[in-house]
Each structure stands twice: as C-alpha cells, then as structure tokens.
Image (cartoon, rainbow, N blue to C red):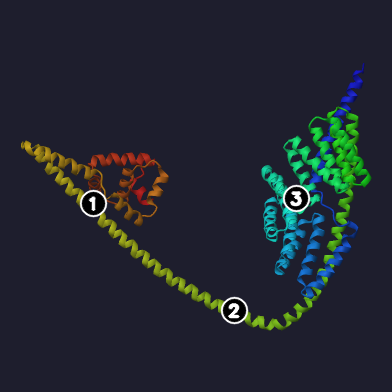
Amino acid sequence: MRTMKGKLRDQLKYCIYMLFFLLFTCNCSLWAQEKPITNFANNDAGAVFIRMKQKLTVALKENDFKIAAECYQKIGELFYYQAAYSRALDHFFKADKLFKAENSQLNVAVNLNKIGETYYHGRQYNAATKIFQQSLGIYKQLNNHQGIAQTYGFIGQTFEKTNGYHEAVKYQQLALDEYAKANDKSGLAKIYENLGSLHEDKLKLDSALKYFTLALSLNKANHNRLAQIEVINNIGDVYRKSGKYQQSLSHTHQAANLARQLKDYYQLGSAYRDLSKAFNLLKRNDSAYYYSEASRSIFLQIYTRDNEKQIALLQTLFEIEQKDNAISHFENEKKINNVIAIAAGAIAVLAALLAFSVISRQRLKIKNEQKLHEQNQQSLKGDLEIKSKELTSHTLHLIQKNQLLEDLKERLSLIVKDDKRDQRKELKQLLNLISINHNQDKNWEDFRTVFEQVHEHFFDSVKKHCATLTSSDLRLLALLKMNLNSADIATMLGISQDSLRISRYRLRKKLQLPEGENLSTFIQNV
C-alpha cells in the first residue's frame, strides 16, 4: 500500500501541474488569437519595404497609378503581416483609390478582401463584413468563382467570431459550392476544415469528424503535408471530446511527428498542448505535465523570437520612413520658403484689407441686429397688448353672460314657485338647461388659450407646486392671476362667494402655502 506521504506528494504534484496547465492554456490561447500570419520573411522585410518605396516613388512621378497601387498594396501587406493594422489599412485604402481610378475591378476586389482581413484580425468584425460584401459583389459581376468562394469563406469566419453560428455555416456551404465549380481542391479542403471547426465548437462531433476527414483526404491528394498537420490534430481533438482517448492520442502523436519533420513548431506546440489535455483526462498526470511544459516552452520560444523580429522590423521601417520624411520635408521646406518670401507682402496687404472688411461688416451686422431687435420688441409688445385686450374683453363677456344667466335663473325660479301648475314642468326643464350651461362653461377652453398666450408658462409653474390641481383649481388660479374681484370670480365660476372662500382655502392647502402668505400675492409672483 502507498503511504500517506506518497499520496500527499502525488496530490501536490497534480495541483502544481493543473496550475501550470491552466495558466499556460490561457496564455497560449490568447497569443494564438493574436498570432500574425507570416508571409514575408522577417529578415527580408526591410529590403522589401525599401524596394517597394523606391518603386512607388518612380511610379508616382511617372503617373503609373496601377504600379503605384500595387506598391501601396505590398507595403500594406508588409505592415499587416507584422500586425500593424492601422498602418496596413492606410496603404490598402490608398491602393483601393488608385485601383478604382484605373477601373481595375479584379484588383479592387482582391484589395478589398485584404482590407476586410485586416479589419477581421483587428477584431472590427462589422467593418470587415461590410468590406467583404463589397468584394463579393464585384466577384459576382466578374463571375469569378474562386474569388466568390474565398469571400464567402471570409464572411463565414467573421460570423463565427460574432457567434452567428447558422450564418457562418451558411456562408461556408456557399464557399464550398463555389470552390467545387472552380474545381479548387485546396480551397475545398480549407472550407471542409472550417466547417469541421464550426461543428466542433457546437459539439456536433460526428459532423465535425466527417468534415475533418474530407479535408484530410483532399490535403493528402494535394500532397499538402503542412495542411495535414492541423487537420490531423483537429481529428484528435474531436476524439478527445468524444471520450475516445486512445484514438485521440494516436492522431495527436501523428500530428506532432509530422510537425517535427516539417519543422512547423507552432503546430508542434499545439499538438503537445492537446496531448497534455488528453493525458490529463486519462489521469496520467506525469505525461500531462511533461507535454504541458513542452508546449509552453515551444510557444514561449516562438512568441519571443517573433516578437523580437517584429520589433526589429518595425523599428527598421520606422527609421526608413523617418529618413524619407526628412528628405521630403527638406525639399518641401525649400519650396515653401520661396513661396513665403513672395507671398509675405501680399498676405500683409490682404490681412489689412480683410481686417477692415471684417470690422466694417461686423459694425453693420451689429447695427442691423439692433434695429431688428427693436422692431421685434415693438412687434411683441403690440401683440401682447392685443392679447391682453382680447383676454379682458373675453373675461367681461363671460361675466356679463353669467350675470344674465344668474338673473334669468332667479326669475325662472320665481315662475316655478308660482301656482300655475301647467307651466311648471316646462319651466323646470328650462331652469335645468340654464344650470347645465352655467356650470359647464363651454367657453373655458377659448379663455384658457388666450390666457396662456398672455401669461406664458403660468399653468406649468403652478403645477410644479402641486401636480394634483384640478381643472376647477386652474380656472380659479387664472381668474386670480387677472386680479378680478371676488364677486366677478364667483359669477364666472357660477358659485356663491361663500363657496369661493372655501375653494380659495382648499387651493391654499394644495399649494402648501405657509400661514401669513397671501394667496393672491403668491399667484402674482408665479
């Protein structure tokens, strides 16, 4: 039997392994997402840049815009492969402008896809999709099946990054159809691999295995051993996720051996990482730890080496551009000095004339604005006087009408009290009609409209003090604002003066006026 000490040692070793494994997996995953696609050899990149810049200068002088566009595109690619995406986009867009000027549609489409890829790797997925759609439209016009297929593939990959699984599958299937029309087996193999990855992400492992197997078959037929490594490793992943650990180990070992033969250290590191995962699931902790450390070491070396080379390259490119800019600046400075010497006198004269003109126009503008302001003030004053007169007239009309109704009501009441029974029913109906007309004054809205034109924002202001004011409260407030006496207010509202005193008391309560503060004074200050 194993001792307690031995068990503790194994558990400690396992915990240490898991810590390294998790940290390493996280770091490597992040690095893998950012890993630039290498095309130019880093050692030759500086020479390529110098050659392209020289070629570009000549092309621009000779107005050979097609060659200039190609140079901008190559320089853009150089920055793109070093993950300097903003610099890359700057040159790709310059190429795009010149290709369009030359009406070179195929080159425009190719360059648009490069712009889209740059946005994609810069994680600007919406911008990438829009650019890919533009490229797709041109390829369709040209009936270029390979271009259509490639662009469909790019769009599918972009949807995959934004979790648009169904759209991603749809576009990869469209790409598959187009590559089939073009009889492009390499393209078909890549799309099969993309579809396998999409299904693997959704744990549709049988479908993933089918597509990876098809991709592997095509890569073997094309004798593309480099492409085989990743596909074999993906098949190993599928077997591991399916719980078939021995088959997983077999395929991942095969991928690792092929990567070693072809000196593809990035794929070798990936294979070691997957071996570590499989051995971890089999509880073979020593092997898991061994391959985790081996994978970490490889990725660390790759990352360090590539990072150093990229920094050195970008420093070289920066220095070259600085020299070019210094020469250009010196030549431009000479021209500018000559222009400045000739134009200095003219500028001084123009400045004096301009200053005089500006001052004169400003004075005229101020004078016109003052005159316009005075006219507006007079107009507003006149309008307000008219509205005030209209409001006063309207109020007097209402008072007279209500007084007439009140007198009529009193007389009809006397008739009703008379002994002439045959008239009583008819007169009582007439009395009710007058009461309804008296209590529900249909002219209130007309009155309110005119009142608000004279006393703007009055109702809004009082509502800030109490949001629960009724329409009756608002009528009383409006009449108080007009400084009418109590008798006129009671007449207009169709109530007695005792009822008016009660209404004023309730209104004070709603407005929460402190004792001693006059209601009318408060209303006049609103």
Dot 2 amino acid type: Leu
| Quarter occupied by residue 340 | bottom right
What residue did someone put label 1 on? Answer: 398
234 versus 402 height, above or below:
above
**In the image: residue 476, left or right of residue 190:** left
Q: Nearer the viewer, mark 3 or mark 2?
A: 3
Would residue 411 appear left or right of 199 to someone viewing this image?
left
Q: CA distance from mark 1 to mark 3?
A: 89 Å
Neighbor class of circle 1 (other Cα within 10 Å; few <14, some 14-19, many 20+) is many
Check disc 2 and report the residue beneath it: 354
Q: Quadrant of the N terminus?
A: top right
| Residue 216 image point, x, y percent | 83, 43
Picture residue at 31% right of the left edge, 43% below the top: 472
State the CA–CA distance, disc 2 to disc 1: 64 Å
- Judging from the image, what secondary structure is the residue with disc 3 in? helix
| Mark before the other along the chain sequence, 3 or 2 | 3
Disc tally is 3
Q: Is residue 236 left or right of residue 98?
A: right
